[in-house]
Image (cartoon, rainbow, N blue to C red):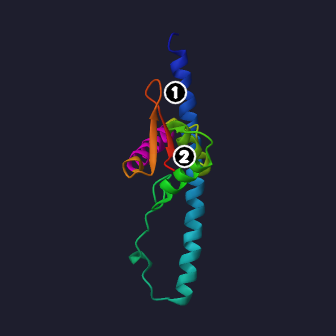
Amino acid sequence: MENDNVVSGMIRKRAELAGEIDSLEGLMREKLIALDHLDAAIRIFRPDIDLEEIKPKPIPPRGQAGPGEMIRNLLTILRKATEPMSSHEITLALMILRSMNTADKGLVRTVSKRVIAALRNHRTQGTLRSYDTPGQALLWEIVR
């Protein structure tokens, strides 16, 4: 019985995944119904159209920022800050600003990598500067 914790954790995860699948199946049904209605409306105006020739438009990846949006948001966060901020604080502030799930550790890690890359890039350009702190953390601020 030494594996009870492991098994109960896997059972919980399975239930979570099954719930997500049910939710996605419902969403897919709704989207298919909406697509059928749209197809019918298009056929009213163009009865001879071949709808199969219309290629699906890809959706952007989760959490993708538009051109310039990342640095614009980072600069806004740093302008409002009363003191230099760590990259982790900036990451969490950015995620809150963009209504992203800060409890998702994988997403926080991904956003953090992008934030750090943008911060370093703008430090090189002279827009931002960083300060060393005890440990490995850097504090960031706008060059004034």
Q: Position of residue 49 (x, y in %)?
A: 45, 85
Pointer 1: what residue? 10
Q: Looking at the rendered structure, which numbered label has been put on residue 24?
A: none
- Magenta stretch bounds: 106-121
The residue carrying mark 2 is 21
Q: Amino acid at mark 2?
A: Ile
Is 142 a magenta residue? Answer: no
Expressed as whole percent of the image width and height from the top left, the position of residue 68 reads 46, 60
On the image, the x and y values in percent for residue 72 come to 52, 57
Q: Are marks 2 and 1 in contact (CB under 8 Å)?
A: no
Tell me if mark 1 has few (under 14), some (14-19) or many (20+) residues whose alpha carbon lies within 10 angstroms of its own.
few
Query: Up-down: is 16 above or below 3?
Result: below
36 up-or-down from 132: above or below: below
Q: Position of residue 20 (x, y in %)?
A: 57, 44
The overriding secondary structure of the stretch rendered in magenta is helix
Q: Is residue 45 above or below residue 140?
A: below
- Tell me how far mark 2 sits from mark 1, CA to CA: 16 Å
Residue drawn where x is 40% and y is 72% of the image: 55
Q: Would residue 37 be found to the left or right of residue 70 on screen?
A: right
Q: Secondary structure at mark 1?
A: helix
The residue lying furthest to the left in this view is 124
115 drawn magenta: yes
Observer-nearest residue: 79 or 6?
A: 79
User: In the rendered view, does 52 fall on the left or right side of 95?
Assistant: left
Q: Earlier in the sequence, mark 2 or mark 1?
A: 1
Residue at point 45%, 89% (across, down): 48
Q: What amino acid is found at the position of numbered circle 1 in the picture?
A: Met
The image quarter in which residue 116 lies: top left
Q: Considering depth in this image, is 35 or 142 the residue closer to the camera?
A: 142
Q: Label 2 crowding class (10 Å Cα cut-off): few <14, some 14-19, many 20+?
A: few
Q: Please, which residue is most extreme toward the front here?
A: 144
- The secondary structure type at the circle numbered 2 is helix
